[in-house]
Amino acid sequence: MTVAHRLVPGERADLLFVCDHASNAVPAGIDLGIPPALLADHIAWDIGAGALAEALAATTGACAWLGAWSRLVVDCNRPLEVAIPEVSDGHRIPGNQCLSPAERRQRHALHTAFHAALAKWILRTRPALLVSVHSFTPRLATDPAPRPWPLAVLWNRDARAADLALAALRADPAVEGPIGANEPYSGKVLNYTMDRHAEANGLAYIGLEVRQDLLADDAGIARWAGILSQTVETVARRLRQ
């Protein structure tokens, strides 16, 4: 139960992709109390983000660190005290309500294991750039206004890499439409994993969000892996200058 991540190996140590919402799996013995179809919904994981992180790792020769369980089990991109959602985009999660102390400790152990192992990996490999890979739904059930951004760049206090990524993406003719800068989500609010492992260690990082309908098939994932791998390489190179 405490195995909370999957590592996609790569030979390159200066770059690490992290996708904490890569999986919609639920450990044996945990019943979320929701219809099975909801596990395929965006509330359970970042659709396409895990595959995109793997493709980016393969393209650049870097490693990818992927969360092993659904964020409905425990959300590794939230502080521990709010990491077990009772409601997500209007859907009640009955299995997360009225947890016993033992059940809560079981969920928290996954969160702790994910971050403790990631911290050790970063200390061992000392990457110069972390890239957080996420995806966002084209519209929320609780707020159905369409989201026009094909992708977004997120950051909190350290904007070194984010500024470079935004400049590179805005100059790329392959990217059509507005590029979100801390929207539809803001890294000043939702940035736990990068706050903990990048900001706290003085490491440059980029938070990337791609709209999920653009990652709906292998062709979409390959397209965005091509675009974003070039962006990441540009950022890495400019950070070294």
Image (tube, rainbow, N blue to C red):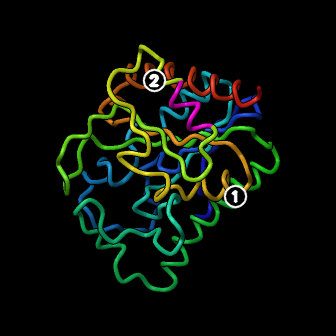
The residue positioned 26% from the left and 40% from the top of the image is: 147
The image shows residue 210, relative to residue 220, as above or below, that is: below
Q: Quadrant of the N terminus?
A: bottom right
As for residue 164 lying within the magenta part, the answer is yes
Residue closest to the far top: 173
Three-letter code for the amino acid on which mark 1 is drawn: Ala
Q: Classify residue 214 by image quadrant.
A: top left
Q: Quadrant of the C terminus?
A: top right
- Crowding at mark 1 (Cα within 10 Å: few <14, some 14-19, many 20+): few
Q: How many marks?
A: 2
The image shows residue 106, relative to residue 69, as above or below, that is: below
- Percent coordinates x, y for residue 221 in the rendering: 43, 25
- Percent coordinates x, y for residue 172 in the rendering: 47, 17
Q: In the depicted view, which residue is nearer to us: 15 or 59? A: 15
Q: Which residues are magenta?
A: 161-167
- Percent coordinates x, y for residue 175 in the rendering: 40, 20
- Percent coordinates x, y for residue 28 in the rendering: 46, 63
User: Of label 2 and label 1, which has the lower sequence position?
Assistant: 2
Q: Residue 170: which disc?
A: 2
Q: Main secondary structure of the magenta part?
A: helix
The image shows residue 87, relative to residue 214, as above or below, that is: below
Residue holding disc 1:
200
The residue positioned 64% from the left and 59% from the top of the image is: 196
The image shows residue 169, relative to residue 17, as above or below, that is: above
